Image: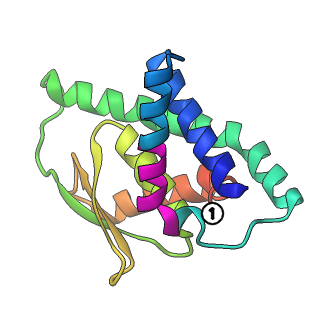
Amino acid sequence: MRYVLTLAGLTAVYALTLASLRPLDLAIGLLVSAALLAVARRFVYAAEPEPAREVLRRIAALPRFFAGVVAEVASGTVEVALVVLGRRPLDCPGIVAIPIEERTPIGVAVAALAFTLSPGDVLIDVDEEEQVMLIHVLDASDPEAVRARHRDFYERWQRRAFP
């Protein structure tokens, strides 16, 4: 049942993205969703289902999480615009290792998506052996400041919704 609901939800997102309910588009969406679930099976089904109270608590935390993502995107957009317009030099771009810490596999995936949505940060790799996410940033001159920013985002915005 969980698989069917997840498959239906992903197919609905695909249909909404295309703004189409044509049968061929729905069939393609179903195939893409099934392939995505096959690849991401360990993330989707990594743990036992959570109690309803925990699910409701996480749903209640989603608006706060989305507000945090919007704030990060706005901040990243300003940063990139300043560099592109020549107002801020591009002195030290580079890759910074962000510790995974207590994030769950879904929490890592959501954090990586949130980082990549913000202009100026791009996920390069998740090194499970070293327990770090490798993020390319526009200013890597102070890696500890970058780590602190990402840790603050997790603690402040993400943890309640996607630990």
Q: How was this image coloured? A: rainbow
* Residue 67 visible here: yes
| Above or below, 19 relative to 11 | above
> Residue furthest toward the bottom?
129
Q: How many marks?
A: 1
User: What residue is at 48 percent from the left and 44 percent from the top?
Assistant: 33
User: What residue is at 43 percent from the left and 51 percent from the top?
Assistant: 36
Q: Nearest the camera: 12 or 64? A: 12
Q: Main secondary structure of the magenta part?
A: helix
Give the position of the C terminus as an image quadrant.
bottom right
Dividing the picture into quadrants, the one containing residue 117 is top left
Q: Nearest the camera: 131 or 32? A: 32
User: Does dot 1 land on a helix, a strand or a loop?
Assistant: loop
User: What residue is at 75 percent from the left and 52 percent from the top?
Assistant: 58
Q: Residue 136 at x, y = what percent?
A: 23, 54
Give the position of the N terminus as an image quadrant.
bottom right
Q: Residue 98 at x, y = what percent?
A: 37, 67
Left or right relative to 105: residue 124: left
* Residue 17 visible here: no
Left or right relative to 55: residue 92: left
Q: Residue 69 at x, y = what percent?
A: 52, 39
Count residues near mark 1 (Cα–Cα under 10 Å), then give few for <14, some for 14-19, many for 20+. some
* Stretch in magenta: 32-42
Dividing the picture into quadrants, the one containing residue 140 is bottom left
- Residue located beneath label 1 in the image: 163
User: What residue is at 42 percent from the left and 48 percent from the top?
Assistant: 113
